[in-house]
Amino acid sequence: MAKTFREVGPVVVTLAMLAALGGLGRLNIATEGVAEFRARSRAAVAALPMTLGAWHAERRPIDNAAKDLLKPNAEATLLYTGPRPGDEAYYAVVQVTDSRNMVGHAPAVCYPGNGWTIRRETQRTWHVGEFDIPGVEYQLERPFKGQVQGWTVRNFYIFPDGRFGSTGEELNRAAEDYRRMAYGAAQVQVVTATAAMTERMRDEVFRALVGSEKSLEMIRVLRAGIPK
């Protein structure tokens, strides 16, 4: 399972191009502090640690086509390997410069579009640091090299007005706010091979990766873009 998990590559996948929305030149789009916020965000994402205790990360490049479509301001896809057999987890973060570009990146859209079947969706709330983070856990399956491959994806969104999000509907609402779209939005995913870990092990991995000091600082930065 470890081999097939690695072979699939980064979590971020090529997405369908979103239709352009007309008439934006007539809208009053807020831009105050956008350049500074984007710079802070890039630095915070780049600072994610490559070593966390017994966990060590390899940086994986984003797919070129996905990069062209998402136009990320900041992104990192890190494959962490731990001390036990099967201890592997992708920690993927992408922040887009235009929140509309994130709409097609919701797991319910992008994973089925790449051959996965969603077997179960579970609303979750994860406590890390000072945050209670709402999100969705997806159980995914697809045929791979004559076998059934299973992934567990924990997904949530970070909005620059201080909110977290767990659903595509919340992402759509953020994308419709043209006044604030220049601040973008961020998506975080922790992906593990379903058969390799118990639920308790996945909880431990999530707390270790998302709850690290550098990760918590990144979350604080990504939530604090729009001036109050």
Image (cartoon, grey):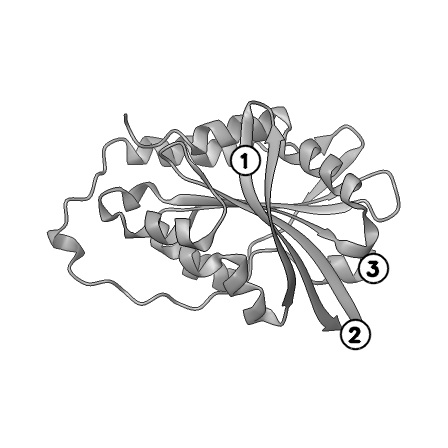
Q: CA distance from mark 2 to mark 3?
A: 11 Å
Could you classify mark 1 by the number of other residues whose Cα lies within 10 Å: few (under 14), some (14-19), or many (20 or more)?
A: some
Q: Name the residue at 11% across, 53% down.
A: 26
In the displayed orientation, state which residue is furthest to the left: 26
Q: CA distance from mark 3 to mark 1?
A: 29 Å
Q: Name the residue at 79% across, 40% down.
A: 201
**Residue placed under numbered mark 1 in the picture:** 133
Q: Name the residue at 23% across, 32% down.
A: 32
Position of residue 97 measured from the top left corner of the image (x, y, whole percent): 36, 47
| Residue 74 visible in rendering | no
Position of residue 207 measured from the top left corner of the image (x, y, whole percent): 68, 32
Kind of residue indicated by mark 2: Lys
Quadrant placement of the N terminus: bottom right
Image side of residue 60 versus residue 133, left or right: right
**Residue placed under numbered mark 2 in the picture:** 145
Mark earlier in primary sequence (2, 3): 3
Quadrant placement of the C terminus: top left
- In front of the other: label 3 or label 1? 1
Position of residue 8 measured from the top left corner of the image (x, y, whole percent): 69, 62
